[in-house]
Amino acid sequence: MNIEALYRPFEIVYKTLDECPKTDHKHLFFELVYIVAGSGKQCINENTFAYKPGHLFLITPDDCHSFQIEETTEFFFLRFNNIYIKSKGFQAEDIKMLEYILQNASHQPGCILKNLSDKPLFKSLVEATISESVNRDIYNQDLIKQIVNTMIVLVARNIAKYLPMATSEATDKKALDILHYIQENICLPERLRVKYLSEHFGISKSYFGRYFKKITQQTYQEYVNQLRIKHVKARLQLSNLRINEIVDELGFTDVSHLNRFFKRYEKVSPTEFRKLDVKNETNSHQLGI
Protein backbone atom coordinates (compact mmCIF):
# COMPACT_ATOMS: atom_id res chain seq x y z
CA MET A 1 0.00 0.00 0.00
CA ASN A 2 1.25 3.49 -0.87
CA ILE A 3 2.08 5.71 2.14
CA GLU A 4 2.51 9.44 1.61
CA ALA A 5 4.52 11.96 3.64
CA LEU A 6 4.30 15.74 3.92
CA TYR A 7 7.53 17.73 3.84
CA ARG A 8 6.21 21.08 5.00
CA PRO A 9 4.14 22.12 8.05
CA PHE A 10 0.96 22.45 5.98
CA GLU A 11 -0.10 22.30 2.35
CA ILE A 12 -3.17 23.49 0.44
CA VAL A 13 -4.20 21.82 -2.82
CA TYR A 14 -7.19 22.68 -5.02
CA LYS A 15 -8.00 20.18 -7.77
CA THR A 16 -10.76 19.37 -10.25
CA LEU A 17 -10.81 15.65 -11.04
CA ASP A 18 -12.84 13.29 -13.23
CA GLU A 19 -11.34 10.23 -11.60
CA CYS A 20 -9.27 9.60 -8.49
CA PRO A 21 -5.62 9.10 -9.47
CA LYS A 22 -4.86 7.09 -6.32
CA THR A 23 -6.02 3.71 -5.08
CA ASP A 24 -6.33 2.96 -1.36
CA HIS A 25 -3.49 4.68 0.49
CA LYS A 26 -2.44 6.08 3.86
CA HIS A 27 -0.77 9.29 5.03
CA LEU A 28 1.80 10.19 7.65
CA PHE A 29 -0.16 13.42 8.20
CA PHE A 30 -3.70 14.74 8.69
CA GLU A 31 -5.82 15.76 5.73
CA LEU A 32 -9.04 17.76 5.54
CA VAL A 33 -10.94 17.19 2.28
CA TYR A 34 -13.72 19.66 1.38
CA ILE A 35 -16.05 19.01 -1.56
CA VAL A 36 -16.54 22.27 -3.47
CA ALA A 37 -18.57 20.67 -6.29
CA GLY A 38 -19.35 17.24 -7.69
CA SER A 39 -20.44 13.88 -6.30
CA GLY A 40 -19.18 10.38 -5.71
CA LYS A 41 -18.19 8.14 -2.82
CA GLN A 42 -15.62 8.46 -0.06
CA CYS A 43 -14.01 5.12 0.81
CA ILE A 44 -12.35 4.87 4.21
CA ASN A 45 -11.30 1.74 6.08
CA GLU A 46 -13.45 -0.45 3.78
CA ASN A 47 -16.57 1.69 4.34
CA THR A 48 -18.17 4.11 1.87
CA PHE A 49 -20.14 7.36 2.04
CA ALA A 50 -21.86 9.26 -0.78
CA TYR A 51 -20.37 12.75 -0.89
CA LYS A 52 -21.78 16.01 -2.28
CA PRO A 53 -20.85 19.74 -2.20
CA GLY A 54 -20.33 21.07 1.32
CA HIS A 55 -19.11 17.81 2.81
CA LEU A 56 -15.89 17.87 4.83
CA PHE A 57 -13.84 14.78 5.66
CA LEU A 58 -10.98 14.25 8.10
CA ILE A 59 -8.35 11.67 7.17
CA THR A 60 -5.93 10.67 9.94
CA PRO A 61 -2.63 8.76 9.65
CA ASP A 62 -4.48 5.59 10.70
CA ASP A 63 -6.96 5.68 7.83
CA CYS A 64 -6.82 3.81 4.52
CA HIS A 65 -8.85 5.78 2.01
CA SER A 66 -9.68 6.74 -1.58
CA PHE A 67 -12.45 8.45 -3.57
CA GLN A 68 -14.75 7.09 -6.27
CA ILE A 69 -15.68 10.06 -8.48
CA GLU A 70 -19.07 9.82 -10.19
CA GLU A 71 -19.46 13.48 -11.24
CA THR A 72 -16.49 15.79 -11.95
CA THR A 73 -15.42 16.94 -8.49
CA GLU A 74 -13.66 20.03 -7.19
CA PHE A 75 -11.61 19.06 -4.14
CA PHE A 76 -10.04 21.37 -1.55
CA PHE A 77 -7.29 19.62 0.44
CA LEU A 78 -5.71 20.96 3.62
CA ARG A 79 -2.84 18.80 4.84
CA PHE A 80 -0.97 19.39 8.08
CA ASN A 81 1.41 17.46 10.32
CA ASN A 82 2.87 17.46 13.82
CA ILE A 83 5.41 20.09 12.84
CA TYR A 84 2.61 22.55 12.16
CA ILE A 85 0.79 21.68 15.38
CA LYS A 86 4.01 22.25 17.35
CA SER A 87 4.70 25.56 15.62
CA LYS A 88 4.59 28.91 17.40
CA GLY A 89 1.29 29.65 15.72
CA PHE A 90 -0.53 27.48 18.26
CA GLN A 91 -0.82 28.23 21.96
CA ALA A 92 -1.41 25.65 24.69
CA GLU A 93 -5.19 26.08 24.46
CA ASP A 94 -5.07 25.52 20.70
CA ILE A 95 -3.19 22.26 21.18
CA LYS A 96 -5.86 21.08 23.62
CA MET A 97 -8.47 21.65 20.91
CA LEU A 98 -6.34 19.80 18.39
CA GLU A 99 -6.16 16.83 20.74
CA TYR A 100 -9.86 16.26 20.03
CA ILE A 101 -8.95 15.62 16.40
CA LEU A 102 -6.46 12.95 17.40
CA GLN A 103 -8.60 11.39 20.09
CA ASN A 104 -12.09 11.47 18.63
CA ALA A 105 -11.79 11.08 14.87
CA SER A 106 -14.22 8.26 14.11
CA HIS A 107 -12.18 6.59 11.32
CA GLN A 108 -15.55 6.11 9.64
CA PRO A 109 -16.86 7.76 6.45
CA GLY A 110 -19.06 10.82 6.63
CA CYS A 111 -19.07 14.60 6.86
CA ILE A 112 -17.61 15.89 10.12
CA LEU A 113 -19.40 19.26 9.97
CA LYS A 114 -22.41 18.61 12.19
CA ASN A 115 -22.93 22.15 13.48
CA LEU A 116 -25.22 23.76 10.88
CA SER A 117 -23.93 27.29 11.47
CA ASP A 118 -20.36 26.11 10.82
CA LYS A 119 -21.12 24.86 7.29
CA PRO A 120 -21.47 28.27 5.57
CA LEU A 121 -18.57 29.58 7.67
CA PHE A 122 -16.27 26.77 6.54
CA LYS A 123 -17.36 27.26 2.93
CA SER A 124 -16.44 30.96 3.10
CA LEU A 125 -13.04 30.06 4.61
CA VAL A 126 -12.35 27.65 1.75
CA GLU A 127 -13.33 30.29 -0.82
CA ALA A 128 -11.13 32.89 0.90
CA THR A 129 -8.16 30.48 0.98
CA ILE A 130 -8.52 29.65 -2.72
CA SER A 131 -8.78 33.37 -3.56
CA GLU A 132 -5.69 34.24 -1.52
CA SER A 133 -3.73 31.38 -3.06
CA VAL A 134 -4.56 32.59 -6.57
CA ASN A 135 -4.22 36.36 -6.09
CA ARG A 136 -1.08 36.28 -3.93
CA ASP A 137 -1.70 39.76 -2.57
CA ILE A 138 0.40 41.40 0.15
CA TYR A 139 0.43 39.45 3.46
CA ASN A 140 -1.46 36.60 1.78
CA GLN A 141 0.65 33.90 3.47
CA ASP A 142 0.02 35.37 6.90
CA LEU A 143 -3.68 35.55 6.16
CA ILE A 144 -3.77 31.98 4.86
CA LYS A 145 -2.13 30.72 8.06
CA GLN A 146 -4.79 32.43 10.15
CA ILE A 147 -7.54 30.91 8.00
CA VAL A 148 -5.95 27.45 8.29
CA ASN A 149 -5.86 27.78 12.08
CA THR A 150 -9.54 28.77 12.09
CA MET A 151 -10.44 25.75 9.94
CA ILE A 152 -8.64 23.38 12.30
CA VAL A 153 -10.35 24.90 15.34
CA LEU A 154 -13.76 24.56 13.63
CA VAL A 155 -13.05 20.89 12.98
CA ALA A 156 -11.99 20.41 16.59
CA ARG A 157 -15.22 22.06 17.78
CA ASN A 158 -17.42 19.80 15.66
CA ILE A 159 -15.60 16.68 16.80
CA ALA A 160 -15.60 17.75 20.45
CA LYS A 161 -19.25 18.78 20.48
CA TYR A 162 -20.90 16.29 18.19
CA LEU A 163 -18.68 13.24 17.93
CA PRO A 164 -17.73 12.23 21.47
CA MET A 165 -15.98 8.92 21.96
CA ALA A 166 -17.89 5.66 22.04
CA THR A 167 -21.25 7.03 20.96
CA SER A 168 -23.70 6.50 18.14
CA GLU A 169 -26.53 8.51 16.66
CA ALA A 170 -28.88 6.75 19.11
CA THR A 171 -27.03 7.98 22.20
CA ASP A 172 -29.27 10.23 24.32
CA LYS A 173 -28.44 13.82 25.27
CA LYS A 174 -27.60 13.07 28.91
CA ALA A 175 -25.06 10.44 27.82
CA LEU A 176 -23.48 12.90 25.39
CA ASP A 177 -23.35 15.53 28.13
CA ILE A 178 -21.60 13.10 30.47
CA LEU A 179 -18.98 12.15 27.87
CA HIS A 180 -18.39 15.77 26.94
CA TYR A 181 -18.06 16.68 30.64
CA ILE A 182 -15.45 13.93 31.13
CA GLN A 183 -13.44 15.20 28.17
CA GLU A 184 -13.62 18.77 29.44
CA ASN A 185 -12.47 17.78 32.95
CA ILE A 186 -10.00 14.99 32.20
CA CYS A 187 -7.21 17.09 33.78
CA LEU A 188 -9.16 17.40 37.05
CA PRO A 189 -9.39 13.93 38.68
CA GLU A 190 -11.42 15.21 41.64
CA ARG A 191 -14.25 16.14 39.25
CA LEU A 192 -14.27 12.66 37.73
CA ARG A 193 -15.19 10.78 40.88
CA VAL A 194 -18.37 8.75 40.44
CA LYS A 195 -19.93 10.44 43.49
CA TYR A 196 -19.40 13.86 41.94
CA LEU A 197 -20.68 12.80 38.51
CA SER A 198 -23.77 11.02 39.83
CA GLU A 199 -24.77 14.11 41.80
CA HIS A 200 -23.97 16.47 38.93
CA PHE A 201 -26.09 14.54 36.40
CA GLY A 202 -28.82 13.28 38.71
CA ILE A 203 -28.00 9.56 38.42
CA SER A 204 -27.77 7.38 41.52
CA LYS A 205 -24.24 6.32 42.40
CA SER A 206 -25.24 2.64 42.45
CA TYR A 207 -26.71 2.83 38.92
CA PHE A 208 -24.09 5.08 37.33
CA GLY A 209 -21.62 2.26 36.49
CA ARG A 210 -24.27 0.16 34.74
CA TYR A 211 -25.62 3.19 32.85
CA PHE A 212 -22.15 4.19 31.67
CA LYS A 213 -21.25 0.70 30.47
CA LYS A 214 -24.53 0.51 28.61
CA ILE A 215 -23.74 3.63 26.54
CA THR A 216 -20.01 3.01 25.97
CA GLN A 217 -19.57 -0.76 26.24
CA GLN A 218 -16.74 -0.01 28.70
CA THR A 219 -16.48 0.37 32.44
CA TYR A 220 -16.29 3.97 33.59
CA GLN A 221 -12.76 3.59 34.96
CA GLU A 222 -11.45 1.95 31.80
CA TYR A 223 -12.96 4.71 29.67
CA VAL A 224 -11.34 7.43 31.78
CA ASN A 225 -7.99 5.61 31.82
CA GLN A 226 -7.93 5.26 28.03
CA LEU A 227 -8.87 8.91 27.58
CA ARG A 228 -6.05 9.97 29.94
CA ILE A 229 -3.60 7.80 28.00
CA LYS A 230 -4.62 9.54 24.77
CA HIS A 231 -4.09 12.92 26.40
CA VAL A 232 -0.62 11.90 27.57
CA LYS A 233 0.29 10.57 24.11
CA ALA A 234 -0.98 13.75 22.44
CA ARG A 235 1.21 15.90 24.69
CA LEU A 236 4.22 13.66 24.09
CA GLN A 237 3.71 13.87 20.32
CA LEU A 238 2.44 17.43 19.87
CA SER A 239 4.22 19.47 22.53
CA ASN A 240 7.63 19.96 24.07
CA LEU A 241 6.29 19.73 27.62
CA ARG A 242 8.61 18.02 30.09
CA ILE A 243 7.37 14.85 31.76
CA ASN A 244 6.92 16.58 35.12
CA GLU A 245 4.86 19.30 33.38
CA ILE A 246 2.58 16.63 31.89
CA VAL A 247 2.25 15.12 35.38
CA ASP A 248 1.10 18.45 36.80
CA GLU A 249 -1.25 19.28 33.91
CA LEU A 250 -3.05 15.94 33.85
CA GLY A 251 -3.35 15.49 37.61
CA PHE A 252 -0.98 12.58 38.22
CA THR A 253 0.55 12.26 41.69
CA ASP A 254 4.16 12.29 40.47
CA VAL A 255 6.39 11.06 37.63
CA SER A 256 6.43 7.50 39.02
CA HIS A 257 2.63 7.43 38.99
CA LEU A 258 2.55 8.54 35.36
CA ASN A 259 5.25 6.02 34.38
CA ARG A 260 3.38 3.09 35.95
CA PHE A 261 0.07 4.18 34.44
CA PHE A 262 1.53 4.71 30.95
CA LYS A 263 3.51 1.44 30.91
CA ARG A 264 0.36 -0.49 31.79
CA TYR A 265 -1.14 0.48 28.42
CA GLU A 266 1.82 1.24 26.14
CA LYS A 267 4.48 -1.15 27.56
CA VAL A 268 7.08 1.64 27.50
CA SER A 269 7.68 4.74 29.62
CA PRO A 270 6.53 8.18 28.40
CA THR A 271 10.16 9.15 27.73
CA GLU A 272 10.76 6.02 25.65
CA PHE A 273 7.49 6.59 23.77
CA ARG A 274 8.53 10.13 22.83
CA LYS A 275 11.95 8.95 21.63
CA LEU A 276 10.39 6.20 19.50
CA ASP A 277 7.88 8.66 18.00
CA VAL A 278 10.65 11.10 17.03
CA LYS A 279 12.75 8.26 15.61
CA ASN A 280 9.87 6.92 13.49
CA GLU A 281 9.08 10.39 12.13
CA THR A 282 12.74 10.96 11.25
CA ASN A 283 13.06 7.58 9.53
CA SER A 284 9.93 8.24 7.46
CA HIS A 285 11.42 11.48 6.14
CA GLN A 286 14.79 9.85 5.40
CA LEU A 287 13.16 7.03 3.46
CA GLY A 288 11.02 9.46 1.46
CA ILE A 289 7.87 7.50 2.30
Image (spheres, rainbow, N blue to C red):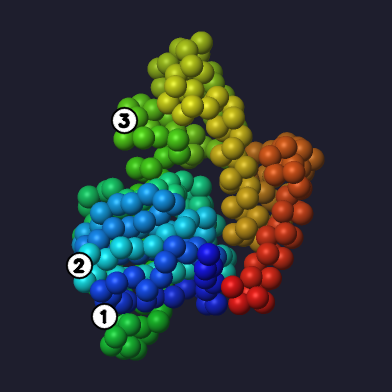
Going from the N terminus, do you reach mark 2 or mark 3 first? Answer: 2
Could one spot residue 97 in this view of the protein? Answer: no
Residue for badge 2: 71
Answer few, some or many: residues within 10 Å of disc 3's Cα (few below 14, many 20 plus, some between 14 and 19).
few
Q: For residue 56, which quarter of the picture?
A: bottom left
Left or right: 148 as drawn, with respect to 27: left
Residue in view at x 52 percent, y 68 percent: 2
Question: Residue 89, position in %: x, y?
Answer: 50, 69
* Closer to us: 223 or 247: 223
Left or right: 109 as drawn, with respect to 97: left
Residue in view at x 56 percent, y 39 percent: 227
Q: Nearer the viewer, mark 1 or mark 2?
A: 2
Give how far apart the Cα atoms at labels 1 and 2 are: 24 Å
Q: Given the image, on which type of amino acid does mark 2 rest?
A: Glu
Going from the N terminus, do you reach mark 1 or mark 3 first? Answer: 1
Give how far apart the Cα atoms at labels 2 and 3 are: 32 Å
Residue in view at x 49 percent, y 27 percent: 217
Question: Residue 100, position in %: x, y?
Answer: 47, 49
**What element does badge 3 sit on?**
loop
Answer few, some or many: residues within 10 Å of disc 2's Cα (few below 14, many 20 plus, some between 14 and 19).
some
* Closer to us: 18 or 111: 18
Question: Residue 279, position in %: x, y?
Answer: 71, 65
Q: Give the vertical position of 262 relative to 85 (above or below).
A: above
**What element does badge 1 sit on?**
helix
Going from the N terminus, do you reach mark 1 or mark 2 first? Answer: 2
Give how far apart the Cα atoms at labels 1 and 3 are: 40 Å
Q: Given the image, on which type of amino acid does mark 3 rest?
A: Ala
* Closer to us: 121 or 276: 276
Residue for badge 3: 170
